[in-house]
């Protein structure tokens, strides 16, 4: 597997058509992109439009710090794709109202000219509606052209602080995994407007009142939880493995990581199944940091799954990363869709295994693994 470099990038966002919806949706699509890892999101800022037809509505702007292994041109294409998904129509007038505008403000310290655009985005250092959100999310980031920090650039362009002001009416909720108690969510927080609307409809369908006190913020919480429980779709194997594969000449003993706790959701009912995995390999000159093995399991567990496929995907990923002599994976899981219906014994569990290379061809290696995994 090739190891691409991950680059820190700052993406600026703007919307002035249904902006309460499209700005959060765009941030969610960035979070859900497999090769873009969102690290930090600015507050939302509001500003009057620059140019555009008379009477154009005000903008919401924000900035995101992300890591990516996409080269700049491909990252830009992916941003264009997200704009299209969110209904952006490009017209002759580059200042026309738009559902969403996504631009690469910075791509590491890259300074480059492309066909019709450049890095850094010149507006990052000159336009208040771009510079102020960037200073909010990454104040100490150094602009490679001026060698000034984003904070200093913001002070320079921010002649009129009234022109770009923080939005107080709506706030982006933080993801499920980044905070503990959910009391931190406040009225007016949004996360994934479209998904939240669907959860609200589900509540109505089952005869609930989504406006009663206990359920008011349930759509928000479910959207956040669902994103977390399925974030395997939003993560790449190279991001998980990043820098943790080492050359180990002469390492020829079986490496086993067992009792790896996992939580997944069955694709038939979207109900949890959970249990423990044991993952072993026989190295051929390359080893991986032990904590990464559990992350490889999570990468595939946090999707809609069947246990057999989960087992095979972990085995194939280990093979891809390490090109070892062999791989063995055993997973034991309990499925709530069976347990809650009582169709099977409630303490029953399902065991699946996948063997590759010598674990498949050599009975002694296989039985050594099975013995160690059960011990
Ligand atoms: Zn099921």
Image (cartoon, grey):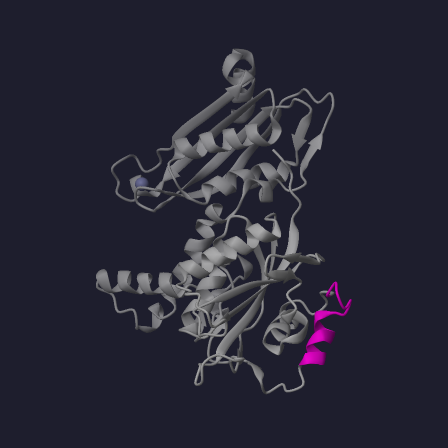
Q: Quadrant of ligand 1?
A: top left
Closest to the observer, 96 or 278 = 96
Residue found at the very far right of the displayed protein: 147
Q: Residue drawn at (72%, 80%), measured in percent from left and top?
A: 156
Residue 268 colored in magenta in the image? no
Viewer-nearest residue: 254 or 242: 242
Please name whichever residue, 173 or 87, is drawn nearer the observer in this view of the structure: 87
The residue range painted magenta reads 143-157
Q: At which x and y percent is residue 53?
A: 45, 81
Quadrant in the picture for the C terminus: top right
User: Is 152 one of the magenta-colored residues?
Assistant: yes
Left or right of 369? Residue 121 is right
> Residue, x 71% and y 74% (percent of image)?
153
The residue positioned 66% from the left and 82% from the top of the image is 158
Up the image or down, 259 lies above or below 219; here it is: above
Relative to 320, say whether 99 is above or below.
below
Residue 8 quadrant: bottom right
């Amino acid at each position: 597997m090739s190891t691409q470099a991950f680059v820190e990038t700052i993406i600026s966002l703007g919307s002035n058509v249904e902006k309460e919806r499209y700005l959060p949706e765009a941030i969610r699509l960035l979070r859900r992109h497999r090769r873009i890892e969102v690290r930090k999101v600015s507050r939302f800022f509001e500003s009057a439009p620059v140019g555009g037809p008379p009477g154009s509505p005000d903008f919401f702007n924000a900035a995101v710090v992300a890591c990516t292994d996409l080269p700049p041109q491909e990252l830009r294409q992916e941003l264009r794709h997200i704009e299209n998904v969110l209904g952006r129509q490009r017209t002759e007038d580059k200042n026309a109202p738009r559902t969403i505008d996504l631009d690469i403000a910075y791509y590491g310290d890259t300074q480059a000219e492309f066909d019709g655009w450049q890095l850094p985005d010149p507006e990052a250092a000159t336009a208040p509606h771009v510079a102020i959100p960037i200073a909010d999310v990454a104040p100490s980031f150094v602009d490679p052209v001026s060698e000034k920090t984003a904070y200093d650039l913001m002070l320079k362009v921010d002649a009129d602080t009234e022109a770009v002001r923080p939005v107080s009416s709506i706030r982006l909720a933080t993801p499920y995994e980044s905070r503990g108690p959910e009391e931190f969510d406040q009225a007016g927080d949004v996360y994934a407007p479209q998904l939240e609307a669907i959860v609200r409809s589900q509540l109505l369908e089952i005869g609930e009142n989504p406006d009663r006190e206990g359920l008011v913020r349930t759509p928000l919480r479910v959207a956040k939880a669902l994103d977390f429980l399925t974030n395997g779709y939003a993560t790449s194997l190279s991001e998980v493995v990043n820098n943790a594969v080492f050359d180990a000449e002469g390492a020829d003993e079986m490496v086993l990581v067992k009792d790896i706790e996992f939580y997944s959701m069955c694709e038939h009912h979207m109900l949890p199944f959970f249990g423990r995995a044991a993952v072993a390999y026989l190295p051929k000159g390359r080893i991986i940091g032990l904590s990464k093995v559990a992350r490889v399991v999570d990468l595939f567990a946090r999707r809609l799954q069947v246990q057999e496929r989960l087992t095979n995907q972990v085995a194939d990923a280990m093979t891809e990363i390490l090109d070892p002599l062999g791989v063995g994976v055993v997973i034991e899981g309990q499925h709530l869709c069976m347990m809650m219906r009582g169709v099977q014994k409630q303490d029953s569990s399902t065991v699946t295994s996948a063997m590759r290379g010598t674990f498949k061809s050599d009975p002694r290696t296989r039985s050594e693994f099975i013995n160690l995994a059960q011990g």
